Image (spheres, helix red, strand yellow):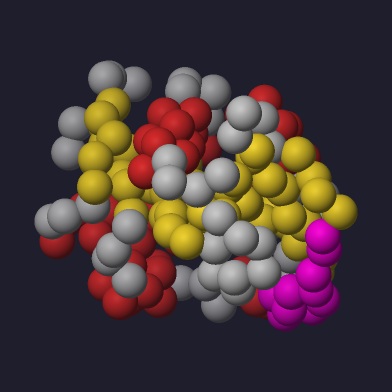
Amino acid sequence: MGKFVIKPMESEDEINGKGYVHYKSWHETYAGLIDAGYLEAVTLEKCVATAHKWPDNILVAKDGEQVVGFAGYGAYRDGTIPACGEVFGLYVLAAYHGQGVGYALMRAAVERLSAYERVAVWVLKGNRNAIRFYERFGFRFDGTEAEIRLGTPNTKCRMLLERA
């Protein structure tokens, strides 16, 4: 891997690259964790279309001209936690795991949420790699769980990063 940069998503190529990372990382990450039929329906075309619909508050990690990861961030979506930001998604191509890309994306997203006292992430129960990553970053489970249907019922768990 060359040197990677973290930057706001801006160009058509970056939007398309984000869509590709979304598609590829879902298949790399969730195989065996979610319903195979649901995962099969997560197509490159759908992920690219989604990237074009919601281009705001997205950071991309680039290795040269290739998007290799992304993070989406903003105010906590359901408003149940006061003064809380949220990292909505953090995905990195498997070939770039362990190289600091995810950490750099998370650090940049959390910095952009500096106005909030805490930052939330939701993680799929059983996604051990993501849970370990978030814990190393300082997130802790707060006991909140919710059902999410990904073809079949799954459980997502909320983790919070409390600012000192």
Asked if 76 appears above or below 96 in the picture, the reply is below
Which quarter of the figure has residue 6? top left
Q: Give the quadrant of the N terminus.
A: top left
The spot of residue 39 in percent (x, y) is: 62, 69
Where is residue 62 shown, x and y percent of the image? 27, 36
Q: Is residue 150 left or right of residue 48?
A: right
Left or right side of 31 for 75: left
Span shown in magenta: 144-153
User: With respect to residue 22, does 106 lie above or below?
Assistant: above
Quadrant in which the C terminus is drawn: top right
Tell whether 66 sits left or right of 136.
left
Vertical order, 42 against 12 (above or below): below
Magenta span contains residue 33: no
Is 145 in the magenta? yes
Front position in the image: 76 or 7? 76
Residue under the image location 82 percent in, 60 percent down: 144
Q: Answer yes or no: is residue 97 visible.
A: yes
Q: Residue at x 57, y 55 (%)?
A: 84
Q: Main secondary structure of the magenta part?
A: strand
The answer to whether any part of residue 93 appears in the image is no
